[in-house]
Image (cartoon, rainbow, N blue to C red):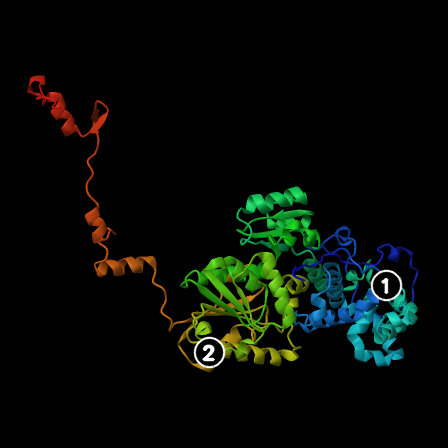
Amino acid sequence: ATHRMAVSSILQLDPSFHKHNHFSTPTISLRPAIPRDEPIPVHVASPEREQTSPIVPENDARRFELYELLEQVYSTLWSGRNRVSNNTFLHLDLRTKRWLCQTAFEVLNHRSVVEEVLNESGFYAKNFDLHSHEALVHVIAYDFLKSKFAIRLPPPDKSPPLVLRCADALRKHSIKLNATVARMRVKTDAKTLTELLPRDAREKYLRALHHPHYARVNMAKVENVSSEVIARLTADNKLSQVHSIDQLASSTGAFFHGWKDLVAFSPDCRGKMDDHPLVHGGQLILQDRSSYHVVERLMRLLDTCPAPAHVILTSPGIEALHIASSLKERGVVSIYGLSSVTADVFQQSATLFGVNNIQLHQTPFSALLPTDSTANTASLILCLFPSTRPTVTNPVDFVLQDGGHLISSPAHKGAGSFIEEHTGILDHALEFVGVRYLAYVTCSVNSSDNEGFISRVMKKHETSQYRHFPPTAQDQEGLEHYLAILENMSVDPLPTPSEVIARAIAEGILSTDGLSHVEKKKKKKSKKVFSSSDGIPMTIAAHKKIVHRKPSEVHVRPFRH
């Protein structure tokens, strides 16, 4: 449960199916045929790359046991929360998590196709009572369609009754479902279910699947990145190193190392890196590039704060472990809003990553009093929030790698609940008048979550105490997150080195040449050695006295016993 992972295989129907079907029944398609003469964009993967080995449960009985949990994961992604609030999910093995998230992501992207097949085949006309369980019908119908109904129903006592009810109804309706899919494929000349999607949706889906896979080098356990990480990647996994991140999209078994402690892998490495010894040993941490750059930006702020730095997170996330491993002995990180289960998971992760400067609190951040002396003098309060319209390219990577699945938060319904929660937490954070910086992070394209929200909060408080640093183009480069920083102007900023020197000169502590008066007294002119006589070093003046002195003038004092 401590390893974040994502998956990259896309499951398809048999591409040769369209060559052998002879359906000619006229029907009306809800979308026009795809022009075959249009050029395919370079970022769209070829069919050969899509036909990777699927990751599936070990048997059909296990599949049916997971359908209810699959429905919850799918509903989570569908709602845009990107957070699986289910403790059962945390304790699953990596293979099962991978199958659940990948299948849920596929159903989400093929939802329009599945709904069209169900409606055109008349499924809900015969099973109207199942319309209220739409999400469960979607996941089972998609799984049946992509396997061409090869999945066998388990005994009644081996699966939840509602799951068996949906599966049995779909199997009885299988002839009409298959016929509807066949007609749609013939009309659009589609070889796979994915090609039934509208062009824009299809390109977005394939682009997400072939997004690079990222991992951060854990500097708390690694001293030399080249010898301890890069060399092992090429030796153990026989991966090839490319010289540009753009080369990863068309490569297999490759990686790119162009940052201090971040490594990008080709999309086919998703799943493979989960079992790598460097990941199991905590030297590599699966983490997306966007959250990585957020923490790097915040670390530049923390470098300006007096040591030891204290960072407070209003909710858990992979950012907490990243900041803690970067600070090491220079500071501490406090996380609020953890459940007992997520606290155990975070503690296991901290142990694995060699992080011992992290504090876990099950009390919510809203219960933390502004009069708390430790919290009120924190260096940074980091507010992490969900989003109404997430911008992440691959939500599976976000949920599994960036720790979204570790958050056990209540379900949100509608944008109003998000905005209300954001406002309450940020209002509370602004009450800590001794905190130097406040950071607000979302992964949303909705302006009401981003610039508009910050503007409303600042206007509501009507104070000049905080200065808003809107994200610059450089800050947002490569980011899928929105990052806003508020600086508390009432906290005295640390002087720069030049300001410290100027003040010391003005107070007479240092002279204009940068030396203190004590150092000047201690510093004496040393005589330079230019010559020697009989191996004895001496100055030129002393050497001249010896050379020019006549032998008769040398008086030898008699030796006395």
Q: Where residue 260 appears, x then y in whole percent?
A: 52, 51
> As rendered, which of 129 and 19 lies closer to the eye?
129
Q: Residue at x 89, y 78 (%)?
A: 126
Q: Residues within 10 Å of mark 1 (few under 14, many from 20)?
A: some
> As rendered, which of 440 and 56 lies closer to the eye?
56
User: How many circles with numbers are drawn on the protein?
Assistant: 2
Q: Amino acid at mark 2?
A: Pro
Q: Residue at x 54, y 60 (%)?
A: 356
Q: Which residue is mark 2?
A: 370
Q: Residues within 10 Å of mark 2 (few under 14, many from 20)?
A: some
- In space, the residues marked 1 and 2 are separated at their CA atoms by 54 Å
Q: Where residue 493 appears, x then y in whole percent?
A: 37, 67
The relative height of residue 377 versus residue 241 in the rendered view (above or below) is below
Q: Which residue is mark 1?
A: 60
The reply to whether dot 1 and dot 2 touch (C-beta < 8 Å) is no
In which image quadrant can residue 125 be found? bottom right
